[in-house]
Image (cartoon, rainbow, N blue to C red):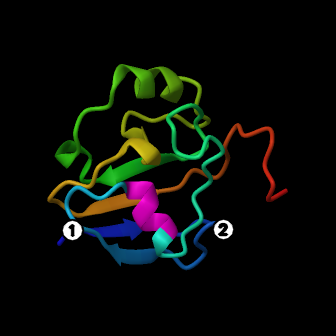
Amino acid sequence: MPQIVILPHPERCPEGAVIEAETGDNLIEVALANGINIEHACEMSCACTTCHVVVREGFDSLEESTEDEDDLLDKAWGLEPDSRLSCQVTVGEEDLVIEIPKYTINQVSENH
């Protein structure tokens, strides 16, 4: 069973976290189910970039991103080569280390 390590984020996960996932699980759904409130303004429909994460370890174990995801990622704040939209990530067989970026470009956030 793969583990997902969420690196500390000042607002979303101050202590960091280690959570269990099943191969085939959706990354953001596993995070939300474990109390890690990754922003998702489009309700996980691959229509925004608020759930942008950086996969620090385990990136190569993931399925490739789609063209739609890549187009959206181009607009994400703090884009890196190992960036993904967590709503589009299916957990593979390897452990993952995930960093939630400090900012999003969400202009309509209920949390602010």
- Residue 7 shows up from this direction: no
Give the numbered dot on residue 10.
2
Residue at 32%, 31% in the rendered image: 65
Residue at 37%, 69% in the rendered image: 5
Distance from Cα at disc 2 to Cα at disc 1: 25 Å
Vertical position of residue 11 compared to residue 15: above or below: above
Picture coordinates of residue 66 (x, y %)?
Answer: 33, 26
- In the image, taking residue 51 as reference, residue 106 lies left or right, namely right
Which residue type does callout 1 highlight?
Pro
* Label 1: few (<14), some (14–19) or many (≥20) C-alpha neighbours in 10 Å: some
Which residue type does callout 2 highlight?
Pro
Q: Which quarter of the figure has residue 21?
A: bottom left
Q: Main secondary structure of the magenta part?
A: helix
**Residue placed most toward the observer, 45 or 108:** 45
Picture coordinates of residue 104 (x, y %)?
Answer: 67, 43
Vertical position of residue 46 compared to residue 2: above or below: above
Picture coordinates of residue 76 (x, y %)?
Answer: 58, 32
**Disc nearer the start of the sequence (2/1):** 1
Range of residues picked out in magenta: 27-32
- In the image, taking residue 107 as reference, residue 20 lies left or right, namely left
**Residue placed most toward the observer, 90 or 52:** 90
Q: Quadrant of the N terminus?
A: bottom left
**Residue placed most toward the observer, 11 or 26:** 26
Residue at 58%, 71% in the rendered image: 13
- Residue 60 shows up from this direction: yes
Viewer-nearest of discs 2 and 1? 1
